[in-house]
Structure formats: C-alpha cells, structure tokens
Amino acid sequence: QARLAESGGGSVQAGGSLRLSCAASGDIVSTRCIGWFRQALGKEREGVASIYRGLNNIYYADSVKGRFTISQDNARNTVYLQMVNLKPEDTATYYCAADPCYVPSAFGGSWYRPSSFRSWGQGTQVTVSS
C-alpha cells in the first residue's frame, strides 16, 4: 500500500495560484494511478484530476478544466496539482489518492470516484477568499 503526503495548501485571494504536491512512497505498482480529490465543508468528496502515470493519461473535472494542471515528477515520485485563477468555490481540503489500477481501460470511467483509490493522504487545506 502506498503512503502519500500532501503539501502546498494555503490561503489565497481569488485569482491567485497554488501548487499542491503529493509525495508518494511504496512500490511503484501501488501508485500507478494518482488522483486529486477535494472535500468542502458539508459536501461530498469529489474528484478534481487524476493521472494514469505510465501512460500519462490525464482527466479533469469540468469545474477545473483550464485552471488546474496535474503533472508528475517520476524522479521525485511526486505528483503535482498546479491551480491558477482560483475561485472561492475551490475552497476545500484537498487529498491525493493512489491505486494500482489493475484495469487501465476502466480508469477512464472511474477516475473521479473516491472508491477507485485504495490509499489516501491526510489532506491539505486550500482557502480562497473573494
């Protein structure tokens, strides 16, 4: 099972930027897929962006397309979420998650589901003020 540690959260004004990092440890299979999720107060956890690392297949939620970018640094075993033009509605605790993704063809239809991921980080808070 993977161990994940998020960092990079903080408080910014609307229109600002942040870069979240997800440092992964464990065997490479367990982190074949990495997803970023967020959970706002009183709301369900939602998928923001995910990557199937070996194929660099990337998926985004419609609400963040054009503003968020997921990328990976294999040498550091780290996946990033660059967020620009942040909005107050982006305020949430952000989590990264990992999964072995034994069925790559299914990931495209399940990347946004929390149940698709086996390992989770502790979360990092992002607050965007208007």
Image: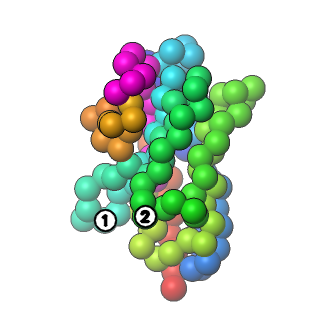
Q: Earlier in the sequence, mark 2 or mark 1?
A: 1
Disc sitting over residue 123 in the figure: none
Q: Which mark is residue 63?
A: 2
Q: Residue at x 57, y 62 (%)?
A: 66
| Number of marks drawn | 2
**For mark 1, what is the residue?**
41
Residue 95 in sight in this render: yes
Residue 14 position (above or below residue 11): below
Residue 116, percent from left and from top: 32, 32
The boundaries of the magenta stretch are 94-106
The amino acid beneath tag 1 is Leu
Answer yes or no: is residue 117 visible.
Answer: no
Report the residue that reaches farthest toward the front: 105
Identify the residue at horizontal 59%, vertical 23% (top origin).
Answer: 54
Indicate whether residue 100 is drawn in magenta.
Answer: yes
* Residue in the picture at 27% in, 35% down: 115
Viewer-side label of 2, 1:
2
Q: Marks 2 and 1, Cα distance to the nearest angstrom? A: 18 Å
The amino acid on which the numbered mark 2 sits, given as a three-letter code, is: Ser
